[in-house]
Image (spheres, coloured by chain):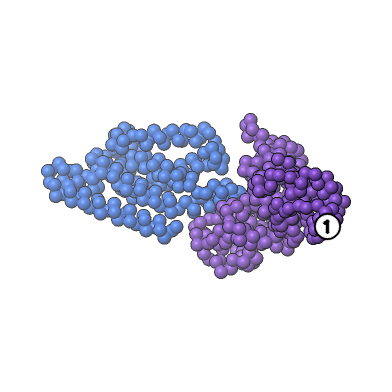
Chain colours: A blue, B purple
């Protein structure tokens, strides 16, 4: 569930990020309207507390996967919350790329496509890795909430078998496992950042 | 050849380029100097279309920039290389990959790219660092890589935007000599934007001084130096003038290696029986010659005699006013 949601969020998020970075006022093909609309939508989605978003889009979820309960269904809200988040992170990373480098690329005749894919994205990779690591951990946190609406996963275990059964061992045990998992993901992210820089 | 006539550009209400007229010939090294904000970087960027101009004409070998589509301008940029103050290299790629980048974008064959990259890296003398990343290079080395990259598409013009402003004096000199060598052996015209007059003196044939978007002085480096127009003084500031004595009168004499006989001042002292002190003297290198300045201090009563004498022997002089 976490991996599917992360992958989908990343794919959609990166496409959104690229559109944002191009249409921004000092981007490669500024377009005030596209940027404003996309920017606003992303801000609105990100303002929703996840648990509310989960419930609010139940009809939409049902329309896509046929149900609003269970692991498969949880992927929909996780992606809808995750994609704008990833988009913002990647947009930030791309924006950090040296403006002078982009100007140099224009000066030797690189096309906009080449500037984005041969220069901006490769330069931004370490920063993107850092950001995606953050996103995964965040999505992991959200899945615990998804667990509350029957999505299964560690969150469900913690809440259903631990909290609801007044079994502290299970509840804290799953939390401990989550702590280790998050630490492992973060460490992997840091490691990748270092070797790719 | 670059021909610019009546070029104008405004950002909203503010006019950043006013009536720019200049010509840069093939193989010439041309300096654009001025204070920060004078418009020189903007003018430079109009040459390769990175900035658009509002009116006037900018022709490079009869290619008028504004009359062409973005796609055509992009093609045309193969003829113009550019280097920057902060080098603008890809941090995650090696020196080899950085130099190869333009050729990759234009679809050159791998074997050709390999041959050319090695040739360029040798030209800029950075062979020992070919597989290193920019992070381990010094400023001078990074600029060499940038120069190699800028030359990779065999341009006829090289634009330099404050290319030595971030380098120490010794490294600056090395880079300037490299550029001079490249211009002479490959016949490339160089347009060099800088705020440092010393840079212009080292390699430029001609120079234009820009003030608030206008060209206020124009000509060969030696003539600008000899004539000392007001805009040159504005650029250099008055710091040297503060060192001169406040009694008597100060006369500045300027010379290049051609126009002065080394014994002029002592001859003058003997011929006129006039005493003078040397308030200040400086000799600076200009390409392969010198540009010299001597400020002498004489009593008020002798000024006329001395300046007449100097005119007769053909030396350029100017009485400094306070």
Split into 4 quadrants, where in the image is the C terminus of chain A?
bottom left
Q: Which residue is mark 1?
A: B270
Position of B101 with respect to B27 (left or right) is left
Find residue B210 and report its horizontal and vertical position in percent: 69, 42
Q: Quadrant of residue A191?
A: bottom left
Q: Furthest-bottom residue in view?
A: B128
Figure check: B202 above or below B246: below
Q: Identify the residue at image location x=29%, y=43%.
A: A142
Position of B199 with respect to A118 (left or right) is right
The secondary structure type at the circle numbered 1 is: helix
Label count reads 1
Q: Furthest-right residue in view?
A: B312
Find residue A165 and report its horizontal and vertical position in percent: 12, 43
Residue B284 shows in this picture: yes
Closer to the camera, B58 or B318? B318
Find residue B259 and report its horizontal and vertical position in percent: 82, 56
Find residue A171 and report its horizontal and vertical position in percent: 17, 47
Closer to the camera, B311 or B272? B272
Q: Identify the residue at image location x=54%, y=61%.
A: B138
Figure check: B67 above or below B180: above
């Amino acid at each position: 569930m976490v991996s599917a949601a992360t992958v989908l969020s990343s794919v959609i998020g990166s496409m959104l990020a690229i559109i944002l970075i191009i249409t921004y006022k000092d981007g490669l093909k500024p377009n005030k309207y596209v940027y404003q609309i996309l920017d606003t939508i992303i801000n609105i989605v990100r303002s929703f507390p996840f648990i509310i978003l989960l419930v609010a889009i139940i009809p939409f979820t049902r329309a896509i996967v046929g149900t609003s309960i269970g692991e498969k269904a949880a992927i929909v809200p996780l992606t809808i919350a995750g994609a704008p988040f990833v988009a913002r992170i990647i947009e930030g990373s791309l924006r950090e790329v040296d403006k002078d480098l982009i100007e140099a690329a224009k000066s030797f005749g690189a096309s906009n496509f080449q500037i984005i894919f041969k220069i901006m994205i490769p330069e931004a990779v370490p920063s993107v890795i850092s950001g995606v690591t953050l996103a995964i951990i965040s999505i992991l946190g959200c899945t615990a909430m998804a667990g509350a609406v029957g999505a299964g996963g560690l969150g469900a275990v913690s809440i259903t078998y631990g909290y609801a059964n007044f079994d502290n061992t299970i509840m804290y045990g799953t939390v401990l496992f989550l702590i280790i998992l998050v630490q492992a993901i973060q460490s992997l992210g840091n490691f990748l950042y270092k070797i790719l820089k | 050849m670059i021909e610019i006539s009546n070029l104008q550009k405004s950002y909203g209400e503010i006019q950043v380029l006013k009536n720019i007229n200049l010509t840069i010939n093939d193989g010439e090294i041309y300096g654009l100097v001025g204070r920060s904000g004078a418009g020189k970087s903007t003018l430079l960027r109009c040459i390769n279309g990175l900035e658009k101009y509002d009116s006037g004409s900018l022709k490079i070998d009869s290619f008028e920039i504004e009359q062409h589509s973005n796609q055509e301008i992009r093609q045309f940029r193969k003829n113009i290389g550019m280097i920057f103050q902060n080098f603008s290299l890809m941090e995650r790629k090696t020196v080899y990959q950085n130099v190869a980048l333009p050729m990759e974008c234009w679809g050159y064959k791998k074997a050709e790219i390999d041959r050319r990259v090695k040739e360029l890296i040798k030209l800029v003398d950075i062979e020992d660092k070919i597989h290193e990343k920019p992070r381990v290079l010094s400023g001078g080395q990074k600029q060499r890589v940038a120069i190699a990259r800028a030359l990779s598409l065999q341009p006829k013009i090289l634009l330099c935007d404050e290319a030595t402003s971030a380098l120490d004096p010794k490294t600056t000199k090395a880079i300037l000599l490299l550029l001079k060598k490249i211009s002479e052996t490959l016949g490339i015209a160089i347009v060099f934007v800088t705020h440092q007059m010393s840079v212009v003196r080292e390699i430029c044939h001609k120079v234009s001084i820009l003030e608030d978007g206008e060209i206020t002085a124009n000509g060969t480096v030696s003539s600008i130096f000899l004539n000392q127009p007001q805009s040159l003084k504005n650029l250099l500031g008055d710091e040297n003038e503060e060192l001169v004595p406040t009694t008597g009168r100060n006369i500045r004499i300027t010379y290049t290696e051609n126009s002065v006989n080394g014994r002029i001042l002592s001859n003058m002292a003997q011929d006129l029986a006039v005493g003078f002190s040397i308030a200040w003297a400086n000799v600076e290198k200009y390409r392969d010659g010198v540009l010299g300045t001597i400020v002498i201090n004489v009593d008020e009563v002798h000024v006329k005699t001395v300046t007449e004498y100097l005119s007769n022997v053909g030396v350029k002089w100017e009485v400094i006013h306070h």
